[in-house]
Amino acid sequence: MTSTTEPTGTYASHIVSPGEFSSLWEAIIVDQQIKDSLLSQAILNFTLRPKVDRAVVPLHGIILLTGKPGTGKTSLARGLASRTAESLAFETGIIEISGHDYEVDLLGNGGA
């Protein structure tokens, strides 16, 4: 679902219910150790981040997936959000962005 009130570059934001995209998580073919690491980081972000002062440990709570179009980043993110929601027994969120909209802002205008 796309909202007209989303910040520039945000394609969509979703609230993910436990199990909503679990089939995507199962369909992603990647080393199990990578999946375990991603899930552990996501759970850590939701459980530890609210308890630790950012000045002490600068956990940001973001997992950034990069790669060419069509390589499964969105499916992996949705599956990870779903599996995280299952593990924590509550809804989680996912924000999809368009990197093309950020390129100019992040890289500047060539020194002009």
Image (cartoon, grey):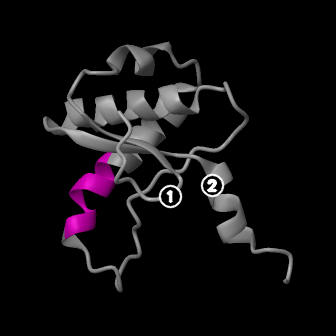
Residue pushed farthest front?
4
Rendered residue at 54%/35% (across/down): 34
Dot 1 lies on which element? loop
Q: Are marks 1 and 2 in contact (CB under 8 Å)?
A: yes
Q: In which quarter of the image is residue 52?
A: bottom left
Q: Say left or right for 38 vs 88.
A: right
Q: Say left or right for 101 vs 97.
A: right
Dot 2 lies on which element? helix
User: Real-space Cα distance between discs 1 and 2?
Assistant: 7 Å
**Does the stretch in magenta take in 93?**
no
Q: Earlier in the sequence, mark 1 or mark 2?
A: 1
Q: Position of residue 16 (x, y in %)?
A: 26, 33
Q: Where is residue 13 in the image (x, y as percent from the top left)?
A: 36, 43
Disc 2 crowd, CA 10 A, few/some/many (<14, 14-19, 20+):
few
Write down the region rendered in magenta: 43-50
**Does the stretch in magenta take in 46?**
yes
Disc 1 crowd, CA 10 A, few/some/many (<14, 14-19, 20+):
few
Rendered residue at 75%/74% (across/down): 108
Mark 1, residue position: 8
Mark 2, residue position: 101
Instruction: Please identify the dominant SS of the magenta region.
Output: helix
Rendered residue at 38%/13% (across/down): 23
